[in-house]
Image (cartoon, grey):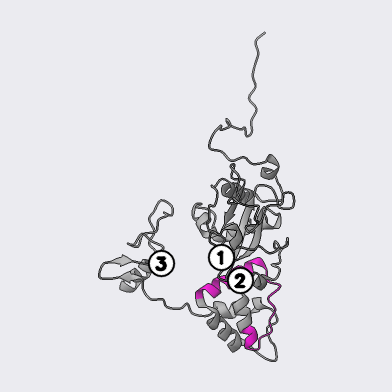
Amino acid sequence: MSEHTHIQGGIQRGPRLTANFTTLSNEVINDDRLSFRARGVLMHLLSKPADWRARSIAIAAQSPREGRDAIRTAMRELEELGYLVRERVQYPDGTFAIVHTINAVPAEQHAQPGPGNPEDDSSGADESGSTQRIDLPRIETKPTSPKAATPTQRVPKRVGVLVSAHAEGRFDTLAAACRDKGLAARWDVLKPEQADVIAGLLETHGVDALAKAAVDAHRPSSPTKFAQGYIGTWSAIPAPRRASSIDRRSNTCSCGDCDGYGFLPEEVNDRVVRCAAWATRTAVAA
């Protein structure tokens, strides 16, 4: 009797690789609490080598479909479930930074040592790359020895609300400047997306400009109660004019983003892209 093999329709798995792969639990891959986008971002980050660092905009640049906001949303999903853990560290010069650690197992199930733990004499990643640290937008970190940083308690798990954002060091100076001018708006109930917007405005305009705009918009009869109430006012501030980074004599650019001649290192849709400084120069010349 001849045997017949009936091929069934559907999706089937191809051959497994035996090299250049990342070990990841099937439980994590099938964690239906995460969106498929968040799972993809998690796997992408865990595939990177030890001490690899990037910003969400750089991660988004590697995909023609996801933008920075989509990547940030995925990051928030990972943080809410413990795959991404934030820790505050202080350097010898007194400055603070937020270190973000990506885990292959949620922090609630597997506690990871902090960046300042004396027992942590490695980069925080094992040979399989199951734990990686990344720098998220507008948060600059730098490698430190275990004794140079002292972690505080991990930011508590949150759902939709950023707990005490200014206490993490992001808005300390701005909040103090507003208080010094008699503004009593609260900074402890910012949603994640609102904190990101304010951080961007702070980076663009600086503390003094934002504090002045908040004072100018202040109405004693109806004061702003929450910091997010200033977002509309701050967003209306004209972007400051920056000194050109282009040397017209040598026709070179020193903005730091391009190769020195106005071309960014990463292509978009297989096309070279000019840096912002060079694009502005071209527009003015036209």
Which numbered marker is on residue 276?
A: 3
Classify 10 Å Cα crowding around label 1: few (below 14), some (14-19), many (20 and above): some
Dots 3 and 2: beta carbons under 8 Å? no
Label 3: how many Cα within 10 Å (few below 14, some 14–19, many 20+):
some
281 or 75, nearer to the observer: 75
Where does the magenta region start and end? 178-204
Mark 3: secondary structure: helix
In the picture as drawn, the residue positioned furthest to the bottom comes out as 221
Question: Picture coordinates of residue 23 (x, y %)?
Answer: 62, 40
Residue at the image position 67 percent from the left and 8 percent from the top = 1
Residue 192 colored in magenta in the image? yes
**Residue wearing tag 2:** 170
Instruction: Tell me which amino acid carries mark 2.
Output: Arg
Q: Residues within 10 Å of mark 2 (few under 14, many from 20)?
A: some
Q: CA distance from mark 1 to mark 3?
A: 21 Å
Look at the image and say whether residue 184 sits in the magenta stretch.
yes
